[in-house]
Image (cartoon, rainbow, N blue to C red):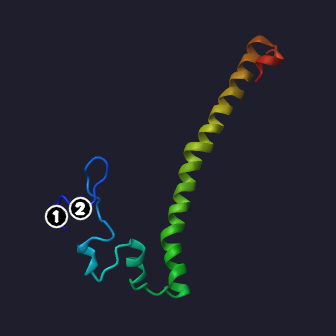
């Protein structure tokens, strides 16, 4: 098939991998990626104690570290903001002797 006989789209481009091209006709390897994966050997699942130990060794320390970081940066910061607001309100009450108006308390 010459260059002028090959199928082209409206812009004159050739398809990347035409399914009926001569280059794939004699190829024993399938074109579809899923068909290629179907021929690969799947490794066996590790035994349960080994798999569980691996999960504990890799996942649990990471989850613990993330929980500590989340508490340190999230909950502690939130608590400090509210504590500062409570201390500010107590200081204001001490100086003025009155509570803020109801709509300004929030």
Q: Name the secondary structure under disc 1.
A: loop
Report the residue at 26% width, 57% height from top: 14
- Give the number of marks: 2
Callout 2: 10 Å neighbours few (<14), some, many (20+)?
few
Which of these two is toward me, 55 or 37? 37
Count neighbours of disc 1 (C-alpha within 10 A) and say few if under 14, some if 14 to 19, many if 20 or more.
Answer: few
Is 64 on the left-hand or right-hand side of 17?
A: right
Could you tell whether 90 is left or right of 23 in the image?
Answer: right
Which residue is at a point 59% across and 49% down the rendered structure image? Answer: 71
| Residue displayed at 25% across by 50% down | 12
User: How far is disc 1 from disc 2 in space, using C-alphas?
Assistant: 7 Å
Picture layout, residue 23 above or below residue 17: below
Foreground of the two, 43 or 85: 43
For numbered disc 2, what is the local secondary structure? loop
Q: Which residue is mark 1?
A: 2
Q: Does 66 sit left or right of 10 as displayed?
A: right
Instruction: Name the spot of residue 75 as percent of width and height, x first.
Output: 62, 44
Residue under circle 2?
6
Spot occupied by residue 60 in the image (x, y as percentages of width and height): 54, 67
């Amino acid at each position: 098939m010459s260059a002028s006989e090959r199928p082209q789209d409206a812009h004159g481009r050739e398809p990347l991998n035409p399914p009926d091209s001569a280059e794939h006709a004699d190829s024993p390897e399938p074109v579809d990626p899923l068909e290629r994966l179907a021929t690969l050997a799947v490794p066996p699942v590790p035994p349960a104690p080994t798999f569980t130990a691996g999960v504990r060794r890799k996942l649990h320390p990471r989850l613990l570290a993330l929980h500590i970081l989340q508490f340190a940066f999230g909950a502690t910061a939130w608590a400090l903001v509210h504590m500062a607001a409570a201390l500010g309100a107590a200081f204001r009450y001490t100086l003025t002797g009155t509570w803020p108006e109801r709509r300004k308390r929030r």
